[in-house]
Amino acid sequence: MYVPFDKIDENAKCWIYILEKNINFKSDEINLILKSLCEKWKSHNNEVVSSFQIYRDRYIILFAEEGISGCSIDSSNRLLRYELDRLNINVMPNSKIGIFIENKIKLEDRSSIINLIQANKLQPNDKMINTTVTNKKEYNKNWILEINKSWLTNFIK
């Protein structure tokens, strides 16, 4: 059962999909797909209270309240990936990290970020997308972090 994002419980779990390209050219269609996925999402024949966010046309974040089974998570993942494939939109590996450079998001891997910091092309207080959030509360509080306040700090000291 779809609910607007502001109505979903703060403990709702989340799953993050990083998109290879911006989806603004298909945003209306993707909103309909996501709303339909949430409307149809079931776990052991029970409706899953769910919602989603699209961040900067590059990230899809699905949220679901408690009582969701692994099978239903897998099913929603397959359905979303199928729909994105149909639209020729690839999902990037979660190992890619979104870094804000001049207010634009650039996707890098951990070693590239470390090299950029060491070359002074990226500062520890620059912002990044924190794809390690696991629920709505963390998403609202820690979705965007300074690099030096993230898990990356262990690699840049």
Image: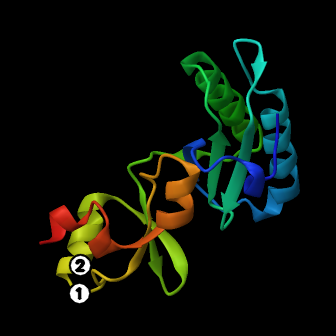
Compared across the picture, whether 21 is left or right of 99 comes to right
How far across and how far down the image is residue 113, in percent? 29, 69
Instruction: Give the quadrant of residue 67.
Output: top right
How far across and how far down the image is residue 105, in percent? 52, 72
Residue 19 in view (yes/no): no
Q: Secondary structure at mark 2?
A: helix
Binning the other alpha carbons within 10 Å of mark 2 as few (below 14), some (14 to 19) or many (20 upward) gives: some
Binning the other alpha carbons within 10 Å of mark 1 as few (below 14), some (14 to 19) or many (20 upward) gives: few
The quadrant of the rendering that contains the C terminus is bottom left
Compared across the picture, whether 155 is left or right of 94 comes to left
How far across and how far down the image is residue 139, in percent? 54, 58
Instruction: Give the quadrant of residue 59.
Output: bottom right
**Residue at 58 percent of width and 52 percent of height:** 136
User: Badge 1 is on which residue?
Assistant: 120
* Closest to the observer, 87 or 77: 77
Dots 1, 2 in contact, CB < 8 A: yes
Q: Is residue 138 above or below residue 124?
A: above
Q: Which mark is residue 26?
A: none
User: Badge 2 is on which residue?
Assistant: 117
- Three-letter residue code for mark 2: Ile
